[in-house]
Image (tube, rainbow, N blue to C red):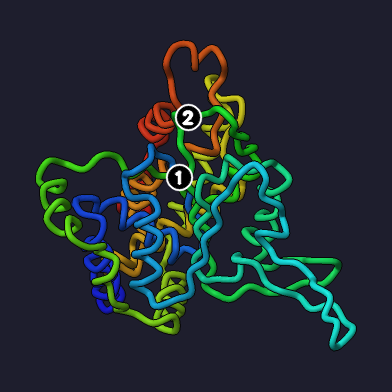
Amino acid sequence: MASFADAFGSIVTNVERVIQGKIEVVQLALLCLLAEGHLLVEDVPGVGKTSLAKALAATIKCSFGRVQFTPDLLPSDVVGVNVYNRESSEFEYRPGPIFANIVLGDEINRASPKTQSALLEAMAEKQVTVDGTTYRLDSPFMVIATQNPIEHEGTYPLPESQLDRFLMRISVGYPARDAELEMLDTHGDHDALDDITAVISVSDLHTMIANTKTVHLAPSLKGYLVEVADATRRHPRLTVGMSPRASLNLQRAARTRAAAAGRNYVVPDDIKALAEPVLAHRLIVTPEAQLAGMRSADVIAEVLRTVPVPSARAR
């Protein structure tokens, strides 16, 4: 795991050349990729959501696809379409931008629900079906979707079933003063993405992903995960609690975080640190709690305080 942690640090450092002062955001994005999940970045325009996706793809030397979601976008614009070839008198499949290792879905909530649903099969099963024929997607495969939480005019909110497909939801936020000053220096006369070179290959990334699956999760911590899930399902301020997919995703993310720290075993802090980005977008707060100003992140914090953590001897 020491070599895993070194490679993880090298990737984060390289991406930070573009996204200054946001090491936690970069780490979460990379954890999401290594856990074979998808990422939803929700923030105002201009804070680096697109740059984060591009820098991550350039650092790993993998293919990158981008879809700018608009109200008139069609599903075929995402997954591809069959085109008639007059020379061969046959239909030929022309893949869409979804056929890439890292796919950026920019402003995903501006597309119609029909177009949004074109991503569901790809995100859940890593395949695309067009006119009855199924095409496998390359591995690794990650969708990084962005949306603006402020401007809702002309948007289509993502349904809960699609939100549940995202392993994490994060926000970039505004940079600190020193980081923004550094950004003015490095980005002022050219695009910092031009300076990014790959520090890891796709085959090396496959090895890292395989290593995360060997990280030990003690039975007591598995029980802790189940107890946290049960607490959200019985919480009076939630109408929808953790799904079984959420439990599995939190387990995968915790194993990846442990490996990034150079450990081959999970500790409770791994679970607690990732609870909010993994769970907050999956939980639905009751209308009464919303009127009181409570968010799903507040409920998660309350649950983590009340559910007993297994003792070190039990682990």
- The amino acid beneath tag 2 is Glu
SS at circle 2 = loop
Residue 197, quarter of picture: bottom left
Mark 1 or mark 2: whose residue is earlier in sequence: 2
Q: Is 40 left, or right, of 154 in this rendering?
A: left
What residue is at 63 percent from the left and 73 percent from the top? Answer: 137
Q: Is 6 left, or right, of 304 in this rendering?
A: left
- The amino acid beneath tag 1 is Arg
What residue is at 17 percent from the left and 52 percent from the top? Answer: 183
Look at mark 2 in the image and give the residue it sits on.
151
Q: Are marks 1 and 2 in contact (CB under 8 Å)?
A: no
- The extreme bottom residue here reads 88
SS at circle 1 = strand
Image quarter hosting the N terminus: bottom left
**Residue 281, x across and y down, in percent:** 51, 38
**Residue 111, x across and y down, in percent:** 63, 43
**Residue 283, x across and y down, in percent:** 54, 33
Could you say which is closer to the camera, residue 32 or residue 153?
153
